Amino acid sequence: MNNNFGIAIHGGAGTILREKLSPKLEQQFRAALTLSISNGYKILQDGGSSLDAVQAAIIVMENSELFNAGKGAVFTHDETNEMDSSIMCGKTLACGCGTLLKHIKNPIIFARTVMEKSEHVLLASDGAEQFAKLHNLEIVEPKYFHTKRRWFQLQVVKENEKETETTRTILDHDGDNSKHGTVGAVALDKDGNLAAATSSGGMTNKRFNRIGDTPMIGAGTYADNATCAVSTTGHGEYFMRLVTAKDISDMMSYKNLDLIDASKEAISKLSAIDGSGGVIAIDKDGNIAMPMNTPGMYRASFSANDKELSVKIFVEE
């Protein structure tokens, strides 16, 4: 039995500035992150699996309008919501992913179902939703994802396109505190098993069925009991180019780096090609890393060695 269990979560990284985040909204974020990580940690504390813990933590954030996942997913250019998700088991390397999901209430539950109930890794669009119905997952009407904040955000971007005659997409937390981000969780349970999971609504005003790093195993999500579990957040195209989540694991395996140094090196590589974002990671010994190259990242961590959970937003915390 492993006594070094723990969990870390993120709710998006980007230009998150104190002066642009009202005290009320900051309080709401800290409360949501606290509820999310507390739900996951309790499962670990009670001897539950890391897979159950990351799923429980993400469901809280998917059900909140604060984050760009599930209920709070951003709108595409065509005024729809297209969501991505993934989950991975460090013990078996089994994984499941979904993309272009439009009616599934909790995309992370879908990813877990793909992993456990199918022979595939990634299902998309209409076929994914047929699979979800077959397994009695909760299906909702598009209006469930229609939030005033996200709708207003899309209209502002479209108006800007007209004025500048340029195509724009908005990344997580791109200079505006109303733009909230991808969510993720990583955990180590008492049995020594690691798990990672990520869920996202992608970019505001995205076109052509754009898919980011979230449903890409190795880019946005990765877990291996021999090394670590990782979830990323930020500009997905760059994480895909670098295969960031897997790269952290590989640097631990092949270069014998510890989790902290491997995670920092991954962010340095991201910065070198002008990518932005952050990662959360936990290793097989329960060490946690949460580096970023942005002014902030909504994040929290809690391990058996901590006296209390930690919730942070700004880079200097």
Image (cartoon, rainbow, N blue to C red):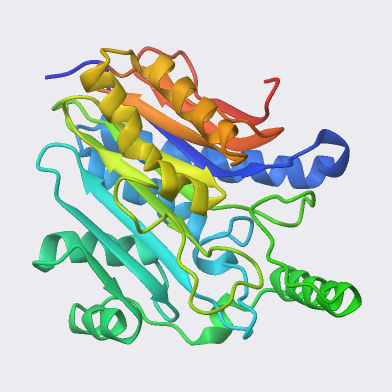
Picture coordinates of residue 160 (x, y %)?
A: 85, 72
**Does residue 275 sit above or below 140 in this rendering?**
above
Image quadrant in which the C terminus is located: top right
Picture coordinates of residue 231 (x, y %)?
A: 40, 41
Q: Nearer the viewer, residue 222 or 147?
A: 222
**Does residue 48 sit above or below 116 in this rendering?**
above
Picture coordinates of residue 177 (x, y %)?
A: 77, 50
Query: What residue occupies the far right of the structure in this picture?
Result: 163
**Does residue 186 sit above or below 136 in this rendering?**
above
Q: Is residue 145 left or right of residue 257?
A: right
Res 139 seen here: yes
Q: Is residue 257 left or right of residue 265?
A: left
**How many numbered badges does the structure rendering display?**
0
Residue at 32% across / 13% down in the picture? 257
| Image-quadrant location for residue 187 | top left
Residue at 22% across / 15% down in the picture? 3
| Image-quadrant location for residue 251 | top left
Residue at 21% across / 65% down in the picture? 113
Res 42 seen here: no
Q: Nearer the viewer, residue 97 or 150?
A: 97
Image quadrant in which the N terminus is located: top left
Picture coordinates of residue 295 (x, y %)?
A: 72, 32
**Does residue 63 sit above or below 275 in this rendering?**
below
Q: Nearer the viewer, residue 274 or 6?
A: 274
Q: Nearer the viewer, residue 161 or 139?
A: 161
Q: Is residue 274 left or right of residue 259?
A: right
Residue at 47% across / 27% down in the picture? 301
